[in-house]
């Protein structure tokens, strides 16, 4: 996948997380991390760097993936 298409896909995930989270930044980070984890099963270094620009946090990954299985999908 080209870098441009990768960026557009990650940006789209970010926008969806922003819409779904309302005004809560913590919820945005949780949702964006969850959406990123679901969309990218095998993450390249480039994808991780781009996701970092939008707030992806590897330290939140473990919490989100566990919580995500217990929460309703939006």
Image (cartoon, helix red, strand yellow):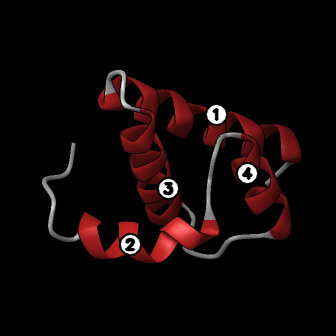
CA distance separating discs 1 and 4: 11 Å
Q: Which mark is residue 3?
A: none
Q: Which mark is residue 63?
A: 2
Taking 6 as reference, is 14 left or right? Answer: left
In the rendered image, residue 3, in percent from the top left (x then y), is placed at: 86, 46
CA distance separating discs 3 and 1: 12 Å
Mark 3 or mark 2, which has the lower sequence index?
3
Mark 1 or mark 2, which has the lower sequence index?
1
**Which residue is the site of mark 3?**
33
Q: Nearer the viewer, residue 35 or 29?
A: 29
- The mark lying in front, picked from 1 and 2, is 2
Height in image: 29 above or below 68? Answer: above
Residues at discs 3 and 1 in contact (Cβ within 8 Å) = no
Height in image: 66 above or below 36? Answer: below
In the rendered image, residue 69, in percent from the top left (x then y), is placed at: 22, 71
Taking 15 as reference, is 11 left or right? Answer: right
Q: Element under label 4?
A: helix
Q: Element under label 1?
A: helix
- The mark lying in front, picked from 3 and 2, is 2
CA distance separating discs 1 and 2: 22 Å
Mark 4 or mark 3, which has the lower sequence index?
3
Residue at the image point whose x is 63% and y is 42% from the top: 10
Q: Element under label 2?
A: helix
Q: Which mark is residue 52?
A: 4
CA distance separating discs 4 and 3: 10 Å
Q: Which mark is residue 11?
A: 1
What crowding class fits label 2: few (fewer than 14 Cα within 10 Å), some (14-19), or many (20 or more)? Answer: few
Residues at discs 1 and 2 in contact (Cβ within 8 Å) = no
Mark 3 or mark 1, which has the lower sequence index?
1
Taking 67 as reference, is 14 left or right? Answer: right
Q: Which image quadrant is residue 64 in?
A: bottom left
């Amino acid at each position: 996948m080209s870098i441009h298409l990768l960026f557009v896909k990650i940006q789209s995930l970010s926008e969806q997380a922003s819409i779904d989270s309302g005004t809560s930044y913590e919820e945005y980070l949780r949702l964006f991390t969850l959406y990123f984890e679901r969309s990218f099963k095998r993450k390249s270094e480039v994808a991780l760097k781009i996701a970092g620009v939008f707030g992806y946090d590897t330290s939140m990954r473990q919490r989100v993936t566990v919580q995500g299985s217990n929460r309703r999908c939006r």
